[in-house]
Amino acid sequence: MINFVEIFIRGLMLGSVYALVGMGLTLVWGVVGIVNIAHGEFVMLGAYFAFWVFSLLHLNPLLSVVFSIPVFYFAGMMIHKRVTERLVKEQELSALILTFGMSILIWNLAQFFWTNTYRSVAYLTGNFPFMGLVFARSKTVSFGLAVGITAALFLFLKYSKWGKAIRATSQNSEVALVCGINTIKMRALTFGMGIGLAGAAGAIVSLQWVIFPQMGGSYISKAFAIVVLGGLGNIHGALAGGLIIGILEAIVTQYLSAKMAQIIPSVTILIILLLRPTGLFKK
Amino acid sequence: MKNRIWFGIAILMIFLISVPFVASDYWVTLLTLILIFTVYAAGWNLFSGLTGYTNFGLAWFIGVSGYVSSLLIADYGLYWLFAWPIGATFTSFVSIGVGYILLRIKGVYFAISMVALTEGTRELFGTEYLSPMTHGGKGVPFVAGISLSTLYWAILLLAVITLVLCYKITSSKFGLRLLAIREDEQAAETLGIHTTKDKIIAFVLSAFLVGLAGAIHFTYQNYIDPSFAFSIHLTLTPIVMTLFGGVGTVFGPVIGATLFTFIHEILWAELTLLYMAIFGGILMTLILFFPQGLLGWMKERGILPRIRKI
């Protein structure tokens, strides 16, 4: 029983990070209407950002998680203004192929400059016991960070002026425009936020796992499974979907193997699309 | 005019068939690769170019079929001529199931699901549970006992069949229905087109052709392993080729495959480490500045007649 509780909590901790990635993808998808296949690559870049800040500047990795959000936010805004905004009105196919190319460009460049060496941020190592269970310190701290960022995102979308404008754009871009919302700006903002979330998730990931240039592929699969679980553009659904994927992964890793856990996203996608293509939750 | 075209095609075919007798092995190898990628690109175009459903899982077709046929040759000693169609047929049957699940809903879901499926299958083929069958991550080396020229003629035959098929389909009612799906799926459905059925047929046909070429590809390589069989490079390159030649055209993929196989040769020799980045960059540039492709551009300028058959 204790064992199962431990697996469950481990899954929740994993899932909180996956949820960050998934929420970023679903936010951009719902508001901008672009499916960003390069989303996983920004997670990878976030992880490398934290790694280099830690190893070159010796800054506290927890601070680099906080710093990664504005850095990736502005990078995302620039990318959207320069590149993806042109494709908003085009067919979905164009944006898909473009971000697919972007994803490959990014990971190959990362591979070229930083090589395939596995790296990790050696900080917060070790475990601590709590109520008869043992937790890794890095994972517990990561969980706290992920929960904090998620809460901040929800509050922002719910109460701030921009958050409301973003939701309006998501519901009906044309009516929002008529109401005086600068939808072009809101799309850039949302794209930046999505990339910011991916970057923050990457920085958190670097605290607990090894990082390497091709890690983005597994994150885009997971993020997409999360979006399918939660329903397109549904932020709350993405949070729930992230936790579900995390818990499933913890269970499968425990009882089958870590390799089998890697096929969870594809199996989830196939099953959900077969049985309930609108996602588990009502929007 | 018509006679002239047939005469040209006959000359070209005689030339292509006689290549192994006159040219060195290097050129035969190069042509083999061009033809393999022609089938990949034309197969991708047959489904994605006509229906507008972007297939990012081309490597999945190639890998599954390549694995089945390679294992049949390596472990069961099956003759290559029988192993290839079995691999391709197996892939087609699995694609019926996958297509049934993924093609009922909107295009975007399909696109990323195929990425996830390819990723998942690669992991699955490397797991300890399938290792007794797939040999896990260490791969399967094998010798099929086929000479380079026989391989070349086989892929030449397949490429010709693929192109004739693409030509026939784009000028048929079935091809028109697929185009209608690309332009406006809801309208197509309202007009009485059974869109799901047509999409699945095109998808499975594409799976069969690409699968067959994949089986030939890995027989030519004499080796297969999960990261190689489901490599993103096998998906990316044919898409770049098709986009360059012209999406939805019949001969665009051929032009793209020929040009980019040469570019591949040069890049692979000079800039191996940046190879994928360059292709990714080319893909982005094509989408942003040259989305209609070479043949599409020539049709717009009036250099070529504006007909679907080219």
Image: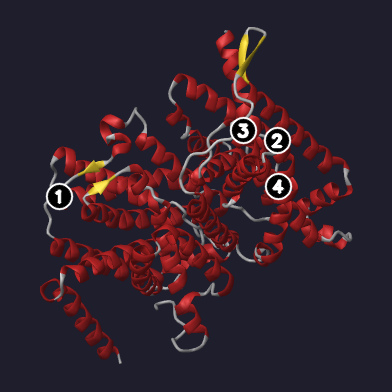
CA distance separating discs 1 and 3:
48 Å
The subunit carrying tag 4 is: A
Q: Please determine if labels 1 and 3 lie on a single subunit.
A: no
Figure quadrant of residue B257: bottom left
Crowd rating for badge 1 (residues with CA inside 10 Å; few <14, some 14–19, many 20+)? some
The outermost residue toward the bottom is B1
Which of the image's four quarters has the C terminus of chain B?
bottom left
A17 w.r.t. B255: above or below: above
CA distance separating discs 4 and 1:
51 Å
CA distance separating discs 4 and 3:
17 Å
State the residue at coordinates (70%, 45%). Answer: A68
Q: Earlier in the sequence, mark 4 or mark 2?
A: 2
Crowd rating for badge 3 (residues with CA inside 10 Å; few <14, some 14–19, many 20+)? many
Q: Earlier in the sequence, mark 3 or mark 2?
A: 2
- The residue lying toward the viewer, choosing from A103 and B155, is A103
Element under disc 1: loop
Q: Are marks 4 and 2 in contact (CB under 8 Å)?
A: no
Label 2 is placed on what type of residue? Answer: Asn
Q: Which residue is mark 4?
A: A196
B53 w.r.t. A235: above or below: below
The subunit carrying tag 2 is: A
Q: Which residue is mark 3?
A: A207
State the residue at coordinates (49%, 46%). Answer: A214
Label 1 is placed on what type of residue? Answer: Ala
Side (left or right) of A176 relative to B78: right
Question: How many labels, in total?
Answer: 4
